[in-house]
Image (spheres, helix red, strand yellow):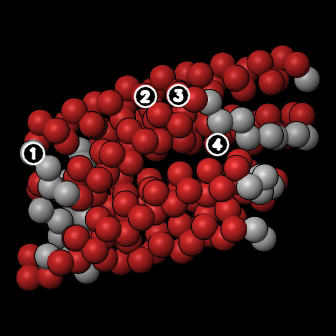
Amino acid sequence: MNLANRITLTRIFLVPVFIALLLYYSPDKSFLRLVALGIFIVACFSDACDGYIARKMNQKTDLGSYIDPLADKMLLLSGFLCLSLMANLPQEMRIPAWVTIVIISRDVIILIGAIVIFFMTRVLVPKPHFIGKITTVMQMMAVVFSLAMAPETIRFLFYGMAVFFTVWSGFLYVQMGGKMLQKS
């Protein structure tokens, strides 16, 4: 258990705190939105920090290669689901369902593909793609701008970019999975 993995685990532990803050949000407790925004931003920066530390301090581990993307998925999916489904949130914070559906669909397709690859090859080595990293950043920005209640044009710009990169990366990961299966 090294520093990079501890940072990743901290991000995982921040997810239920983030969800609880949004769950208990109400107009008379508007400070909870700001705390949730702060926690989400800290969690996003922790994603960059753990990766940087793992590379620069030679702390890459098999554990980290699995829990880092898991932490990202937990954070982002909780953000999109909460901001799409929680009725107690103001409209200026709500993410349209179509955005969340695209993001969840891509992740389900990748998960199913990973399971198929593992069962057919008995090997699964996560290989992040550069477009996948951009996708993660765009999805994080979409959630941040929703939590910040940014003007609608800015929010929808980031929703659009998040969806675009989500679909693009989804196609790239499906191609990558196909090549892995062909090699075996």
Chain-order first, disc 3 or disc 4: 4
What residue is disc 1 on?
A: 151
Q: Residues within 10 Å of mark 2 (few under 14, many from 20)?
A: many
Q: Position of residue 178 (x, y in %)?
A: 73, 20
Nearest to the observer: residue 113 or residue 142: 142
Which residue is located at x 63 percent, y 24 percent?
A: 174
Chain-order first, disc 1 or disc 2: 1
Q: Is residue 117 above or below residue 147?
A: above
**Does the residue at mark 1 contact the one at mark 2 (Cβ under 8 Å)?**
no
Amino acid at circle 3: Ile
Amino acid at circle 2: Phe
The quadrant in which the N terminus is found is bottom right
Chain-order first, disc 2 or disc 4: 4
What residue is disc 4 on?
A: 111
Q: Is residue 139 above or below residue 86?
A: above
Q: Position of residue 19 (x, y in %)?
A: 37, 71
What residue is disc 2 on?
A: 165
Which residue is located at x 74 percent, y 55 percent?
A: 57
Q: Secondary structure at mark 4?
A: helix
Q: Is residue 47 visible?
A: yes
Q: Residues within 10 Å of mark 1 (few under 14, many from 20)?
A: few
Give the mark toward the camera: 2 or 4.
Answer: 2
**Does the residue at mark 3 contact the one at mark 2 (Cβ under 8 Å)?**
yes
